[in-house]
Amino acid sequence: MKYVIASDIHGSAYYCRLLQQRYAQEHAHKLLLLGDLLYHGARNALPRDYSTLKTAEILNSMKDEILCVRGNCDSDVDAMVLEFPITAAFALLPAGDRTLVLTHGHNEYACLKKGDVLVNGHFHVPAFEERGAYTYVNCGSVSIPKENSPHSYLVLENDTLVWKDVETGEIFRKASL
């Protein structure tokens, strides 16, 4: 199976459209969204083409393709304008003999066990780290990247992770699970 994993769109219709295009180009089975879809957050500047309604419209057009977990900036009102569930704190995705624990990243989860992979956004910085018993993966941010990282999304296919720039589609990092 092939998945596109993205987080932290923060209401940017511009970057959401780019993500929609990249998702179509990837021919993935699902778009896994790790929260912070519509609201920009009090600590962030407004992202390019900030429009919660346009962003919701773009995402709603893909509702059958999306599996989503809730981010710290996602509200009950957001859930009312989006046509797919966004209220789950985490999701579990079997991946061979491992489990991917998909979260936004603002909470800790005790359900991690040896060999699991914690996948989140929240920090807006792409990452891949072995952390003792589990592997930590961050897909970065679609619209408000930090620490000079690109506007990014992640592709998971088989045991390979590929980070790509949402603006160019170019690969900037690879890792194997």
Image (cartoon, rainbow, N blue to C red):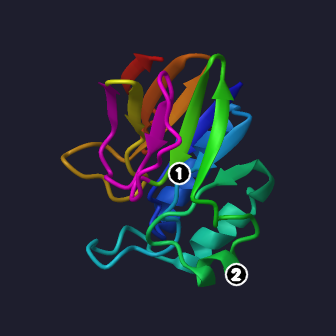
Q: Chief secondary structure of the magenta span?
A: loop
- When asked about the image quadrant of residue 55, the answer is bottom right
Left or right: 4, with 137 as reference point: right
Q: Which residue is mark 1?
A: 18
Q: Work out whether 147 lies above or below 165.
A: below
Q: Work out whether 155 lies above or below 79.
A: above
Q: Work out whether 150 lies above or below 57.
A: above
CA separation in Å, label 2 and label 1: 24 Å
For the N terminus, the quadrant is top right
User: Which three-letter amino acid code belongs to the residue tagged 2?
Assistant: Met
Q: Residues within 10 Å of mark 2 (few under 14, many from 20)?
A: few
Label 2 residue SS: helix
Q: Which residue is more in the foreground, 81 or 117?
A: 117
Q: Where in the figure is residue 32, as x and y percent of width and height?
A: 62, 46
User: Which three-letter amino acid code belongs to the residue tagged 1?
Assistant: Leu
* Magenta highlight range: 105-131
Residue at 32 percent across and 34 percent down: it is 127
How many numbered marks have been drawn onto this rendered protein structure? 2
Q: Tell me which label, 2 or 1, sits earlier in the chain.
A: 1
Nearer to us of marks 2 and 1 is 2
Q: Which residue is mark 2?
A: 80
- When asked about the image quadrant of residue 88, the answer is bottom right
Label 1 residue SS: helix
Q: Which residue is more in the foreground, 91 or 176?
A: 91
Q: Is residue 170 visible?
A: no
Residue at 64 percent across and 67 percent down: it is 87
Q: Where in the figure is residue 146, as x and y percent of width and height?
A: 24, 52
Q: Where in the figure is residue 152, as x and y percent of width and height?
A: 41, 43
Residue at 70 percent across and 32 percent down: it is 27
Q: Where in the figure is residue 165, as x and y percent of width and height?
A: 40, 38
Q: Is residue 122 magenta?
A: yes
